[in-house]
Image (cartoon, helix red, strand yellow):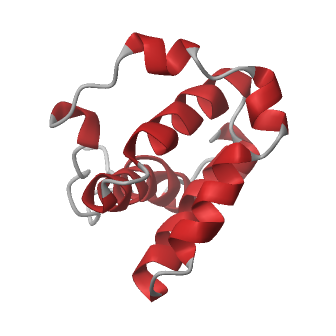
Amino acid sequence: MDWDDPLRHLAPISEHPAKKSTLLSSELSAISDQELASLKVNVRLDRFGLISARHNRTACILRSFLQFLEDEGRKLLAAEILAWIDIEDNLFELANHLVTAILLPCRLSPRSPAAC
């Protein structure tokens, strides 16, 4: 019996930008819950999003993931955003990676949305 993969029509998952850059563990541990609460990341994304439509789309994607990720995932993503806020290509690649690796497979999966 052949398995009919519902995700077979998707493009390959894009690379995570961390493969091209080193994110120090000190940068990850430097982000406290208080910093997240103060919306430091959202303020930076707001400024980033004003540059162009492409920047705004990237900021919206990253902000959406920050909103829905669990605490540990939110902390990791916030650290990556803060570390790469001045490296536009890495933020574009990160947003693209999140869409192709998580969002699209979840949307196209025959499972319920709660499973993603």
Q: Position of residue 30 (x, y in %)?
A: 58, 17
Q: Nearer the viewer, residue 89 or 104?
A: 89
Q: Nearer the viewer, residue 40 or 109?
A: 40
Q: Nearer the viewer, residue 42 or 4?
A: 42
Q: Position of residue 38 (x, y in %)?
A: 83, 40
Residue 112 is at least partly visible in this image: no
Quadrant housing the N terminus: top left
Q: Is residue 108 above or below residue 105?
A: below
Q: Nearer the viewer, residue 28 or 69?
A: 28
Is 84 situated left or right of 35 in this image?
Answer: left
Considering every residue shown, the one lying at the far left of the view is 20
The quarter of the displayed image where residue 17 is located: top left
Q: Residue at x 67, y 38 (%)?
A: 115
Is 80 situated left or right of 106 in this image?
Answer: left
The quarter of the displayed image where residue 15 is located: top left
The quarter of the displayed image where residue 78 is located: top right
Q: Residue at x 54, y 52 (%)?
A: 106
Q: Residue at x 62, y 42 (%)?
A: 116
